[in-house]
Image: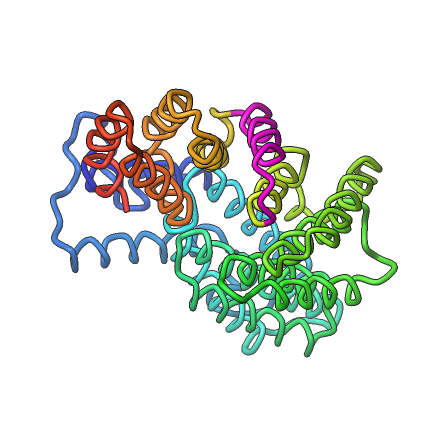
């Protein structure tokens, strides 16, 4: 799929999520009309303009202008954020980031310049803090680490000023995940999880406690503390077994057995437990719906492929990785997933096994073009 054609797919998906004709976002209304041919600068302007239009459609007029804002309009802002979450599931962070960035800026301006009563003001502080946190997540998923940290720190700042615990907990949990990705970041990941747990206090739900324990486990594994990592994994599993109470924030909707298994893969690999890594990787890959969550499916396939290479099960690693490569057009917006898939392909290329080298040579013609 060409980049221009991919842009049309992205904008069409955004229009469908917003419930507006795709022509509103500058997409031709006739399905047989060719996509525009744009150079790099024009393409950025085109997508940036579409992102601005999307925000105008998503948010109430009195928020975007801003004017007198009431409770119903504040509720519409939360609906807009939920739509960004839905788009993220289908398209990946790089695709949705510009919309979230512009939405966070507009909401911040509404908070500063709008007119509202105190009860509405609290909601207007909560939703931009949550949007900033989500912009951070989208940047992280796209592979833009400095942008991610910027938005998470902004979310923490606003949450602290407005005494909004939920957004601060979310940002700290996300920063813990980012820290666990970096060399020497294990201790910071553990500290961030502990800060999030303290911030949540008695309001922490079992699902949140499960997620925090899983991220703490990865931090301990990065440090090399196998005992602490295993204990945190067991704690995460116990909390997950409690099930949902029904009062969890919507950003936790994603958390479940497959995501816990994905954390267990990282713990097992970090502590040199290949058999446990394989068990967890198979569990994650086997429990995700490829059609509903193509990004997670590709991510877990790449993880399983990496584990199978380490375990010298190369024929199966080739088959699993081939399945992930076929999904590449659906996850181009997730730089971290594409980068992981590229690492898996590169590892296959390094094997002293001709079928692996042959497959990697063919796959490389597809994967780099998607980065």
Residue drawn at x 48%, y 35% is 307
Where residue 54 appears, as percent x and y from the top left, is 40, 51
Residue 254 in view: no
Quadrant assignment for the N terminus? top left
Q: Nearer the viewer, residue 107 or 198?
A: 198
Relative vertical location of residue 284 with respect to residue 245 in this rendering, above or below:
above
Relative vertical location of residue 186 with respect to residue 323 in this rendering, above or below:
below
Q: Main SS of the magenta segment?
A: helix
Count how many numbered circles sit on residues in the image.
Answer: 0
User: Residue 293 in magenta?
Assistant: no
Q: Nearer the viewer, residue 141 or 321?
A: 321
Instruction: Kindly indicate the quadrant of the structure image that contains residue 52.
Output: bottom left
Where residue 103 appears, as percent x and y from the top left, is 47, 61
> Left or right of 191: which side holds 273?
left
> Left or right of 42: which side holds 53?
right
Relative vertical location of residue 9 with respect to residue 186 in this rendering, above or below:
above
> Left or right of 326: which side holds 110?
right
Where residue 268 appears, as percent x and y from the top left, is 61, 43
Residue drawn at x 32%, y 26% is 326
State the residue lying farthest toward the front. Answer: 352
Residue 134 in view: yes
Q: Which residues are magenta?
A: 271-289
> Left or right of 210: which side holds 156?
left
State the residue lying farthest toward the right. Answer: 202
Residue drawn at x 47%, y 64% is 148
Relative vertical location of residue 37 with respect to residue 45 in this rendering, above or below:
above
Residue drawn at x 71%, y 68% is 122
Q: Nearer the viewer, residue 223 or 137?
A: 223
């Amino acid at each position: 799929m060409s980049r221009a054609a991919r842009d049309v797919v992205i904008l069409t998906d955004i229009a469908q999520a917003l419930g507006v004709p795709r022509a509103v976002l500058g997409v031709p209304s006739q399905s047989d009309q060719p996509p525009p041919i744009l150079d790099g600068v024009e393409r950025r302007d085109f997508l940036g303009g579409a992102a601005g239009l999307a925000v105008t459609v998503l948010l109430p007029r009195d928020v975007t202008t801003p004017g007198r804002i009431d409770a119903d309009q504040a509720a519409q802002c939360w609906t807009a954020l939920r739509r960004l979450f839905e788009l993220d599931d289908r398209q990946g962070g790089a695709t949705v980031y510009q919309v979230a960035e512009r939405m966070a800026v507009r909401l911040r301006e509404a908070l500063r310049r709008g007119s509202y009563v105190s009860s509405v003001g609290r909601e207007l502080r909560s939703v931009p803090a949550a949007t900033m946190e989500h912009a951070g997540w989208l940047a992280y998923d796209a592979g833009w680490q400095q942008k991610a940290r910027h938005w998470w720190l902004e979310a923490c700042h606003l949450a602290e000023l407005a005494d909004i615990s939920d957004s601060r907990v979310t940002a700290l949990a996300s920063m813990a995940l980012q820290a666990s990705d970096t060399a020497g970041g294990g201790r910071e990941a553990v500290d961030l999880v502990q800060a999030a747990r303290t911030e949540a206090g008695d309001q922490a739900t079992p699902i949140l406690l499960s997620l925090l324990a899983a991220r703490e486990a990865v931090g301990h594994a990065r440090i090399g503390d196998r005992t602490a990592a295993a204990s945190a994994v067991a704690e995460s599993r116990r909390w997950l077994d409690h099930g949902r109470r029904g009062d969890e924030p919507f950003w936790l909707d994603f958390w479940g057995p497959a995501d816990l298994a994905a954390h267990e893969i990282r713990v097992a690999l970090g502590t040199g437990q290949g058999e446990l890594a394989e068990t967890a990787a198979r569990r994650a890959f086997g429990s995700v719906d490829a059609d509903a969550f193509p990004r997670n499916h590709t991510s877990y396939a790449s993880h399983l492929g990496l584990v199978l290479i380490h375990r010298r099960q190369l024929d199966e690693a080739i088959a699993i990785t081939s399945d992930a490569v076929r999904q590449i057009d659906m996850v181009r917006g997730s730089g971290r997933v594409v980068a992981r898939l590229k690492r898996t392909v590169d590892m296959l290329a390094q094997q002293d096994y001709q079928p692996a080298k042959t497959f990697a040579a063919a796959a490389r013609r597809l994967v780099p073009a998607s980065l």
